[in-house]
Image: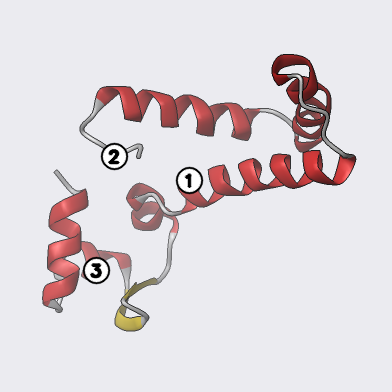
Amino acid sequence: MRISPNKWLSSISWVYIEFLQGTPLLLQLFLAFFGISIVLGVNLSPLQAATFALTAFTSALVCVTHEVGFAREGADRVIFLADGMLVEDTTPTEFFNYPKEERTKKFLAQILH
């Protein structure tokens, strides 16, 4: 959603990711356990609060690691899967500048505006 042309969706996802990356996991667990019960009036068990906090934290981490810029700058190798099949396994330079497969070209056209 960070690459969405919709500014509202991009802004919401940016705030979500930056908040979850910028706060310690222990604080997130604390906020999930006490904050949800205060704000929503729902009493969660410690296990439910921990599951909620860890899911939110992990989803933000997945969003960050799956950004194209991260792959281009920080990766030694890019593996592109589509429909459960290996499409390309190459260097970032080859993947982004000289994609071999049509599926890769279509994917890159959608995410690189």
Mark 3 or mark 2, whichever is nearer to me: 2
Which amino acid type corresponds to the residue marked 3 in the rendered image? Phe
Residue under label 3, please give it.
95
SS class, disc 2: loop
Mark 1 and mark 3 in contact (Cβ < 8 Å)?
A: no
Q: Nearer the viewer, residue 24 or 97?
A: 24
- Which circle's residue, 2 or 1, is located before the other in the chain? 2
Q: CA separation, marks 3 and 2?
A: 19 Å
Q: CA separation, marks 2 and 1?
A: 11 Å
SS class, disc 1: helix
Measured as percent of width and height from the top left, residue 57 is found at: 64, 42
Which amino acid type corresponds to the residue marked 2 in the rendered image? Ile
Which amino acid type corresponds to the residue marked 1 in the rendered image? Val
At x 20% / y 33%, what residue is drawn? 5
At x 71% / y 15%, what residue is drawn? 39
Q: Is residue 46 left or right of residue 102?
A: right
Measured as percent of width and height from the top left, residue 107 is found at: 19, 62
Extreme right residue here? 46
**Hey, which quadrant is residue 76 in on the image?**
bottom left
Mark 3 or mark 1, whichever is nearer to me: 1
- Which circle's residue, 3 or 1, is located before the other in the chain? 1
**Hey, which quadrant is residue 36 in on the image?**
top right
Residue under label 2, please give it.
3
Measured as percent of width and height from the top left, residue 80 is found at: 33, 72
The label number, if any, that marks residue 64 in the structure image = 1
Measured as percent of width and height from the top left, residue 34 is found at: 83, 23
